[in-house]
Amino acid sequence: MRWILLLLLLPLTTACQTVPTEPKNLEWRHMVGSNSDELWVTEVLFYRQGKLVDASTNGSAGFFGAEGLKEKDYRWSISKGSHTTRPIPDQVELEWISFHDKKRYRISLALPAELESIIAQPYRFKVRDEWREERRRNIGLGMATGGYVEAFLTNAKVKPDILLARGIAKEIQTSQDKENSVTKVYKVWFDDFDKAYGDAYQQYPTPSGMAWAPIMDAYRAAQPKTDTNPVQ
């Protein structure tokens, strides 16, 4: 009788051992903004191995005011975005309208192959008497005057930020732009922007294009280092 019971239980045991476990995708998010411009972000597309994994249209973003121009406070100011548990991307495409340049920009950036392992790495930090764990899980997308773009991994508690990619976006014209130019469609917004900040830009002109690269590198280098306790 005992052998009969064992034979009956064997298929059940085997089935339990062979059920595959589904891999858990990491939670991550993206945020957009600027350090020197007001933007209308029309499209953010994330891909992994050529397949679309996340998409958003973030709308109005960026800008920090005339005081930031005067003080040359060019730290990235990112806010709007989304969060997801979809696969970690290896490419991002951005399209936006620059209120300063009066142009529509677009760029595709390749993200590091090891991005998943970087996001997965937790760090320990102490809050009062309690140890907590946190990961860099925010992909920041910063867009500056002259079409300069950076993708960077950031977290308020885990520093410094990690630069993932940078480049210069190209001005593009969509079929919609050919019928009605960007300067016509966004005229009211452009006029309001120039009225509010035009004098400040004249008095405190910003860098442009790749001139931003060493400036942003210096900001990252000056950030406090808190990633000293990686969780093994």
Image: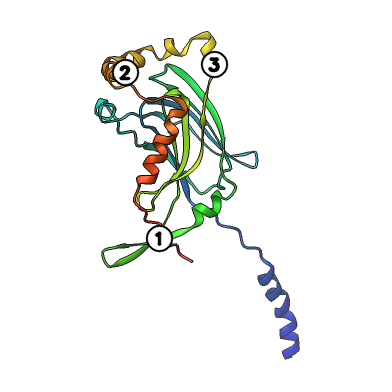
Amino acid type, label 1 = Thr
Locate residue 207, reporting x and y percent.
Answer: 39, 25
Residue 35, x across and y down, in percent:
36, 31
What residue is drawn where x is 68% and y is 76%? 13
Disc 1 and disc 2: Cα gap in Å?
A: 43 Å
Q: Earlier in the sequence, mark 3 or mark 2?
A: 3
Q: Nearer the viewer, residue 36 or 95?
A: 36
Badge 2, how many Cα within 10 Å: few under 14, some, many 20+? some
| Crowd tier of the residue under label 3, counting other residues whose Cα lies within 10 Å: few below 14, some 14–19, many 20 or above | some
Q: Position of residue 177 (x, y in %)?
A: 51, 13
Q: How far apart in space, not on screen, are marks 3 and 1 (Cα)?
A: 46 Å
Rendering quarter of residue 175: top right
Q: Which mark is residue 193?
A: 2
CA separation in Å, label 3 and label 2:
22 Å
Quadrant showing the N terminus: bottom right
Q: Could you tell which of marks 1 and 2 lies nearer the N-terminus?
A: 2
Residue 228: mark: 1
